[in-house]
Image: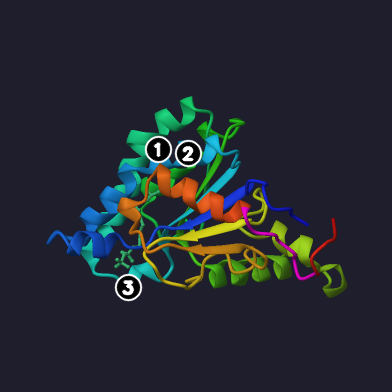
Amino acid sequence: MNKPGAAPRHVAVIMDGNGRWAEARGRPRVEGHRAGLDSLQDILQAFGERGVEYVTLYAFSTENWARPLDEVEGLMDLLADAIERQTGTLHARGVRILHLGRMDRLDEKLARSIERTVALTKENTGLTLSVAFDYGGRDELLEAIKEIVRQGHKPEDIDEHLISRYLYTAQVPDPDFLIRTGGEMRLSNFLLWQAAYTEFYSTKVLWPDFGPADVHSALDAYTARERRFGTVASEA
Ligand code: FPP
């Protein structure tokens, strides 16, 4: 049971609205994604200052492959660019970086560079930043089920803990809070298993406009809530 006032330990973010932000300026959609990447360091800092220990970003979904080729390639280049330009600063700040999602469909060079970043920051003890890239909640569950069968687990041994251990998020607690920018009210195949009791927050602010002040507003809204996890409100 969570009493109002406590900061969320893990915040997940659906960074939506980049396309609309760019289109409103008559610019290609990928420029919206680039603008969305620029504010990341400040946003992570704001989460850290409020005591958040885990931040998970939905950067590319299993469905995003169906976008126009130039946008898909633009997003791949942005991730490569982000790794190259931002890993140093994040590592210096003690951030541990994890990747959630499939590796087998990514370009070999990009996959190796993700692996190097994860390995480099493995022992860091500050904020854990998970980047969901080629991630889908249903795909994650399918892969977990296949692996559980391959490993020969008996039906009676399969419980919630065992399933959680086979998900990409095995090293990460379930999210307490999920922020979606851009005004939509959907989960969009993000953390389907893990978000069972996550508090949901949607803001109309488009992701490239979302800054530290918006982080504080969102966290203030979270701390005013009382989480009951399906039980009734506690007394006193
Ligand atoms: C959704 O906006 C956003 C994405 C599909 C990509 C988000 C990616 C980034 C911010 C850059 C990469 C980030 C990292 C951490 C490498 P949308 O295009 O659906 O916007 P719209 O709803 O306005 O069309």
User: Which one is in front, 116 or 125?
Assistant: 125
The residue that label 1 is drawn on is 42
To which quarter of the image does residue 21 belong?
A: bottom left
Task: Left or right? Give the position of 32 relative to 168.
Answer: left
Residue 42 image position (x, y, % from top left): 40, 37
Tag 2 near tag 1, CB within 8 Å: yes
> Between 29 and 231, which is closer to the camera in this rendering?
231
Task: Specify the farthest residue to the top.
Answer: 92
C-alpha span from label 1 to label 3:
31 Å
- Who's the residue at 36% across and 51% down the image? 210
Q: Quadrant of the N terminus?
A: bottom right
Q: Residue at x 18, y 63 (%)?
A: 24
Q: Residue 228 in magenta?
A: yes
Q: Which residues are magenta?
A: 224-231
- The percent position of residue 204, horizontal first and vertical second, equals 37, 64
- Tell us which disc is closer to us: 3 or 2: 2
Q: Is residue 113 visible?
A: no
What's the amino acid at mark 3?
Answer: Ala
What residue sits right under mark 2 in the picture? Answer: 46
Q: In the rendered view, does 151 fall on the left or right side of 137?
A: right
Q: Is residue 42 left or right of residue 55?
A: left
Q: Are marks 1 and 3 in contact (CB under 8 Å)?
A: no
